[in-house]
Image (cartoon, coloured by chain):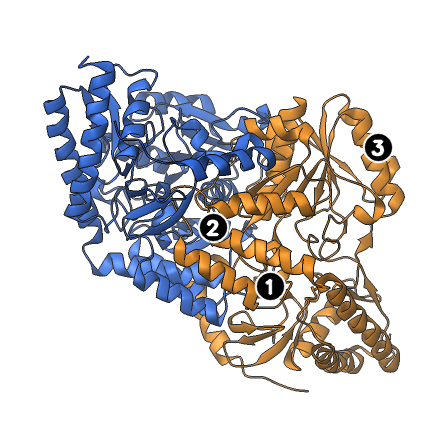
Chain colours: A blue, B orange
Amino acid sequence: MTTIDLTTDADLRSRAARVIPGAMYGHMNAGRLPAGMPQYFARADGPRTWDVDGNDYVDLMCAYGPMVLGYNHPLVEAAADAQRRAGDCMSGPSPVLVELAELMVDTVASADWAMFAKNGTDATTLCLTIARAATGRGKVLVARGSYHGAAPWCTPAPAGVTEADRANLVSFDYNDLASVDAALAAAGDDVAAIIVTPFRHDARREQELASPDFARGVRERCTARGAALVLDDVRCGLRINLHGSWEPFGVRPDLSAFSKAIANGHPIAAITGTDSLRDAATRVFATGSFWFAAAPMAASIATITTTRETDAIARLAAAGQRLRDGITRQAATHGVGLRQTGPPQMPMLTFDGDTGFAMADAFASATARAGALVHPWHNWFLSAAHSDDDIDRALEAIDAGLAHVNATFGTG
Amino acid sequence: MTTIDLTTDADLRSRAARVIPGAMYGHMNAGRLPAGMPQYFARADGPRTWDVDGNDYVDLMCAYGPMVLGYNHPLVEAAADAQRRAGDCMSGPSPVLVELAELMVDTVASADWAMFAKNGTDATTLCLTIARAATGRGKVLVARGSYHGAAPWCTPAPAGVTEADRANLVSFDYNDLASVDAALAAAGDDVAAIIVTPFRHDARREQELASPDFARGVRERCTARGAALVLDDVRCGLRINLHGSWEPFGVRPDLSAFSKAIANGHPIAAITGTDSLRDAATRVFATGSFWFAAAPMAASIATITTTRETDAIARLAAAGQRLRDGITRQAATHGVGLRQTGPPQMPMLTFDGDTGFAMADAFASATARAGALVHPWHNWFLSAAHSDDDIDRALEAIDAGLAHVNATFGTG
């Protein structure tokens, strides 16, 4: 089996252990990943990433979503650089704020207006606050296990979360309208919103596409109750459908939360809404020190414009399909039982019977050693920068990963 | 009286009204400011800002805090540019994350560790979550009227906020230890933390320095109760004292929240804490899509290093004192009764008897027309880029503003 040098990475982890709790935090904490996967990165370009020891990878994580057109995309970086030279974080917004809001309204089918923030969590939280301001109601329906961010109301870790933080949440099961109806009955006439992701993409489980009936059903129920349908498009926005991830179903939310990919890695989040929520959005105090910074807005304009004017989403979906088809062939060859779920542009690979993720860990580690960056229990991301050659190179690494799984665990 | 052209600004406001709720949101919403003050900015450099109509200002708002060394500071921008060319938002952190954490621990007297986020609100919220995780308790003591961010638990606007969002807050009055004791008694044995700003810098009122007895008193009470003292240094950090804003009192918090100025305008926030909170910080899930981005960290290292190696804080304090002394002389000359409160590097000007801020509005508008950007009811900010000449130019504009107040309202 291939081995790679991760000496510099190990040194950095030791230094980090002294000055960072647990040596790292959050979703990029490689302490949650198997040995042999890098924590620290030195460089990224196009579809590729280099770790601090000089090992290079076809990057199928895409910064966990933000990178959608390729690292260092020339048009995006030129737009951000030009705006930064003029002014980025100033004593007020730049005209690019208006231009970006106009572009979002012109692009997102359900949008009559837009506001901007920094984190996906800012956007999902603001959607709920706006829905509550509009309805004068408190309760929000949330799917069990759905990730909507890392604030106390939604973080998956219980540490430091109080009962009050969740007092207004009512749970339902994704894709299960009967459970939505039960939650609505439990909440009575106090339902401000239903928040839902375009498909089920929670970590540590197979992904699950939304059924059209489910999407239409939550839309109908929100309309009937005068509650807001909030689409958490933070992870999917600009990868599934440029105009909103539920447009293929003909389902339009009242409020949408975007972040990750909308500026190809530059820090920004967006909230879009319909005219019926405009007054409520005006009354909510939404702000942050860097929320008006102009360079990420210029980057977002360039990202969305490039995505509109090219076949970027079709290309990244095709890259995902090429990857999926290749893995299907390889799994058959190696006799490894696995499932690939979710849309091809956001793949999730799970091994049959691998309840403790031991096979997934072995696979991700061996695949990294062979030159492709994947995740054992979180979905991956494709970008428009992944050429057929890049996918074929990634498949070579994945083949080594599957061979290692076969060698270690047998064919099941 | 001077008039200036704001035609382009007005056009942008009209366009914004169609695609942004209320035409603008948050603390940079010029709809809350008097007519004659610009909303949109085209350019910023050193201590100066240009609006979209080409009017230029000595900028005494400094992006509402982030700009502390001057816009487009060459060392900061060179560090951010170099890191960006290598990699910014990647599939994991860069070594600059470790370097910045080491630098924070070496710089902030109370810090044994650091974590990084994007918004000041992220940092204050995480401090409370960590304190709750550490103590297993829920209640937090907060000073009445203190601004700690824009999340539902702390936003100054009631729209969309539920009772549950505030259920664990207990109020006290700033600088009033008797009220702290009353709040402690009300909260019983469930106190996780006291959160407090280094001085009282809430909008729409005179600023109030912390008395040393108050600072030491909250420290003693937290220690006695096993609760965490959280210093919200988001607005003051890197302007008052490099090592922590309560260092002059010899008072060290258990947790500190930083943001705004720590990267001279680049988007980052920081949480620092003591070893006793390290395990709790490890258990909290703290993350965001852009929290590991490397360019703002490189900018922060350059900002903190420059501040350490130069007399930046002394210079911006001196600039603030020169401004304050000049305004005191001008007020006497014009016979206008006013008060200047807070530390000189974060000035607040209030007119005697001006309960509705009509005088402040007239003053800020006239001062902007004459070439200096100030705020009628929010503190201003000085930077190390404000030379004596810049302050003198600002004072000329302020003199015109005070003359306008005198002409409009008389000498009281």
Q: Position of residue A279 (x, y in %)?
A: 49, 52
Figure check: A161 above or below B245: above
Q: Is residue A175 left or right of residue A299?
A: left
Q: Position of residue B287 (x, y in %)?
A: 49, 38
Figure check: B28 above or below B165: below
Whether residue B343 is visible to the viewer of this picture, yes or no, is yes
Neighbor class of circle 3 (other Cα within 10 Å; few <14, some 14-19, many 20+) is some
The residue shown at (53%, 33%) is: A14
| Residue under pointer 1 | B63
Q: Position of residue A94 (x, y in %)?
A: 48, 68
Neighbor class of circle 2 (other Cα within 10 Å; few <14, some 14-19, many 20+) is many
How far apart are the two marked residues, 2 and 3, measured between alpha carbons?
38 Å
Residue B216: name its quadrant.
top right
| Residue under pointer 2 | B294
| Marked residue chain, label 1 | B
Q: Is residue B367 left or right of residue A261?
A: right
Q: Earlier in the sequence, mark 2 or mark 1?
A: 1
| Marked residue chain, label 2 | B
